[in-house]
Image (cartoon, rainbow, N blue to C red):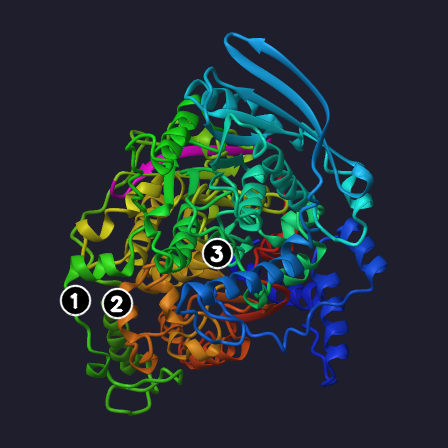
Amino acid sequence: MKPLRVLQFAWVWGCILLGCPVSAADDSSHTRRLATLAELRRMLPRSPAWEAWLERSGELPPDFDALPGVAELPDPLRFQDGRPVRSRAQWQQRRAELLRLFQHYVLGTVPPAPGNVRVAESRERVEDGVRVREVTLAFGPAHRARLHLEVILPPGRGPFPVFLTQDNHRRWALVAVSRGYVGAVYAGADSRDDTGAWAEIWPGYDWSKLTRRAWAAGRCVDYLLTLPEVDGRRIALTGHSRNGKAALMAAALDERIAAVISSSSGAGGACTWRLFSEPQFGEGIELITRLAPDWFHPRLRFFVGREDKLPVDQHQLIACVAPRPVLLSTALNDDVESVWAIEQTRRAALPVFALLGAREHLNLRYRPGEHATRAGDIEAYVDWLDWKFGRAWRPVADAPIYPTYEDWQRASGERIRPRDFPRRGVDDVLRSADGRAVTNAADWAAVRADLRRRLEWLLGEAPPTARDPGGRYGAESRANAVLLQRADPPARVVKESLNFGNYLAGDLYYPTNVAGTERRLPVFVWLHPISVSNGYMAGYFRNEAPHLALTRSGYAVFAFDQIGHGGRLEEAGEFYRRYPRWSLLGKTVADTRAAVEVLRGHPRADPEQIYLLGYGTGAMAALVAGALDERVAGVLAVNGLMPLRLDTRERGTGGVARWAQWLPLLPRLGAFVGAEAHIPCDWHEVMALLAPRPLLVITPGVDYQSRFEDLRRAVDAARPAFALLGAPQNLVFQRTEDYHHFNPELIWCLCGVETIP
């Protein structure tokens, strides 16, 4: 199937399979909530546990029309009613408000401390100079609740600081014991969990599994504070992955925990739901609440695709730990996390630590590799505790990887005055600079040249380079491919690794039945969204990854990591020092054009059928690269677009600040925050530059990052250019009945029915 037919096929089958979104005609809150629940049930994969909870509870989603939408990370120093927090006393009130909200929407409610913890069983042994005491704690109504705790006491009288962790991290505690800490290990992990029965003991509370495990840490503290060997002012709690999530919960709920280390805790831990969900190929609300339905409260699932409506987010949970020390630790290519999301989380929580005079107590630590930890990591965790507990001077550098808007401003020295640029709207592009209507191809050429000039200014000043035919030297190593989970292609798929452009690694995938023939295939260049840890191979994705599904359907697909992602994560950190007047999006566009260059000479690729497929920020790169490179046969842009001149803070999408100040893809946009009408080039103009080549734009019905009517206006504004050039049918706009993610069904819409024989 030729990709032009792909566009037509997508339009037809999009109408059949995906339909139109439901809108509630009735103004009543109850009717809207019923309609939202019906919509969620249609959009989301089945979750039997959630469905059972809905039947039991009879609960409906919130009235999302009545909830404020906050696309950016909500300010922890602002009460729910909008009042600012200006003092420590006000922060204590705000903290209590945040914890109530977290218990309602995310954690579930927890009982108060029982106040009656006692030792039901105890036995002690000596091993290599340390005392190992195993106790069973009893507490709660009639002392029915039980919790196993192992306490490993180093030699000496103490008092010693405490390294408290969960059962499967016992060997972490052994490292700490060797460094003069009391090791305390409790049964609050998958390997041993004593908290499961507590739901029946406290039936009046709707706490989740991770919340119960977090609350269990407090019962350990109850006991530890009775021991003369324990320094009660220096009790640290640690945890990795899901235990890292629980550790943050515990420290927020119990102020006696003096320090917390959250190791690779991911979404629902050190990564906020807003910045590490399906649009970022992250372990977001939908996946977690379906595959691990008891980790968080079922109410959280209502917010799939509407993360902006969630009244709280994880940076605020971390803020609730302030002013106590917090270490956020992750691996650079850990697929449960995102370095960029963690850095944004830390930046958003820091003002609370600063208000409390403890800015230096919220720290970052990165390690190479993937999710697993090593002995050296745990030694470094103890180093950090030594620093925070005053035992040694071992500060953490807190060096973020991702550049900031301020970094670009310092490096570039640019001072852009928006009013120097004319006001423009989202209008018909067939107007010359002096306002005359464009009616022929010759006049369009002049308008097109002006549009291109304005687009190139926004991208920044690209450095000089030369074309390169590519080759095998410098292709991605197998070790790196294994790390990024793309070493071995599935059956009937060939993966050919190449080096192209300015010494970049990329992979060409094609069906095995083409190998050894002279057949050339239509080829898609796959441009991924924000996918920090894994690059083009999604860390979390339903069903088969897009590039593999396309290959199985008979196409060739070329995929590479964009700068700042996957194997090129650290490359972004120094980018604006090296290229102060360019942009990260400009670099991705240049790399995409280099990919087109190498594909045109490859024996498996049809040089006349090179298409760009982009999702999210990848859709932005696909549009721009296609607009600037006539060798691109067509573009498929999936989700993530919002007309820049309409993308104001008032729209609730986060505004153009997200592409300049949150993630500085186009830092020159930062000068236009509040003056969006002066942005020199917008998406409808970029679309027009693609005419008459095929362009498919897909957008979901539920997407707080874009407004459907605004995007439709932009697409309609580009249509006259396609009509002028005799190809009105080549601009296709499709709205799906879905939320913002790369729906697996979209692959089949894009691919049609052809499969690998």
Main SS, magenta region, reads: strand
Residue 275 numbered mark, or none = 3
Please say if 148 is above or below 658. above
Specify which label sits upstream in the sequence, 3 or 1: 3
* Dot 3 alpha-carbon crowd within 10 angstroms: few under 14, some 14 to 19, many 20 or more: many
Please say if 127 is above or below 501. above
Q: Residue at x 25, y 66 (%)?
A: 456
Callout 2 touching callout 1 (CB < 8 Å): yes
Q: Considering the numbered disc 1 on the image, is that residue within a helix, a strand or a loop? A: loop
Please say if 620 is above or below 596. below
Numbered range of the magenta stretch: 490-502
Q: Considering the numbered disc 2 on the image, is that residue within a helix, a strand or a loop? A: helix
Residue 414 numbered mark, or none = 1
Callout 2 touching callout 3 (CB < 8 Å): no
Cα separation, mark 3 vs mark 1, equals 28 Å
Looking at this rendering, what residue extends furthest in the right direction? 56
Q: Residue at x 34, y 41 (%)?
A: 568
